[in-house]
Image: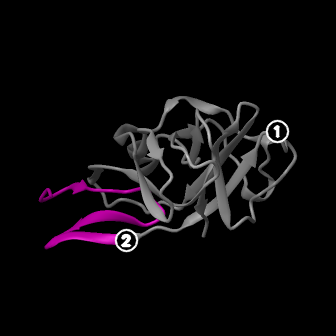
Amino acid sequence: RDAGNTVMAALTKSVVLFPGLTGDVELALNEAEDAHVLSTDPAGNFGASTTMGMGKVSSTQERWALYRFGLPTLPQGMTLKSARFEVFQTGNTAGVSQVLTPYEPAADWQEDSMTWGAKPALASSSLGTGVTFDIQVNQWKSFPLSLTGAQKWFNGTSPHRGIVVKGDGSPAMTSSSR
């Protein structure tokens, strides 16, 4: 904990941490939009789904999960100290582990019109560290995010287009949505 002008943040489905005069204060963030897209259904829209599929299902089938949050304005002079993104894993399609990685979309997207065929390209590098989703279900998974990437959203030097979670292996995983 820092005294003064440092913010600890978590871009998550759960909390963002801000310092208070007498300690850290938690502020819950709710996602503004979420959707998942499926490579074998290029015109399918799953924005209204209550679960989010993510990862490679097979060598020819892939799912991306897209999340976006409303971000609070940081008080003048405050900076982020850390950032993370969390999802609640509710399923595992094949009973084996897979590393999923968060990326930043390179373009804007809308939940009600997002499809595999219209999905945004990804920024050139990952937004954070990949996390292993294993056969254990009904648990929170936390992705440490790039502090530089998260800070630019808060200070307005880059538009906040959200987070895309995708995997490079098999199987696909599911997480809860709103």
Q: Which residues are magenta?
A: 1-27
Q: Is residue 5 magenta?
A: yes
Distance between the Cα atoms at labels 1 and 2?
36 Å
SS at badge 1:
helix
Residue 108 bears which disc, if any? none
- Image vertical order of residue 145 relative to residue 1, above or below: above
Name the residue beneath numbered marker 1.
117
What is the x, y in percent for residue 61?
75, 37
Residue 27 bears which disc, if any? 2
The first of marks 1 and 2 along the sequence is: 2
Between 23 and 85, which is closer to the camera in this rendering?
Answer: 85
Between 145 and 141, which is closer to the camera in this rendering?
Answer: 141
Between 161 and 138, which is closer to the camera in this rendering?
Answer: 138
Disc 2 residue crowd, few under 14, some 14–19, many 20+, Cα 10 Å: some
**Residue positioned 14% across, 56% down in the render:** 2
Disc 1 residue crowd, few under 14, some 14–19, many 20+, Cα 10 Å: some
What is the x, y in percent for residue 119?
74, 41
Quadrant of the rendered image containing residue 18 = bottom left
Q: Is residue 157 magenta?
A: no
SS at badge 2:
strand
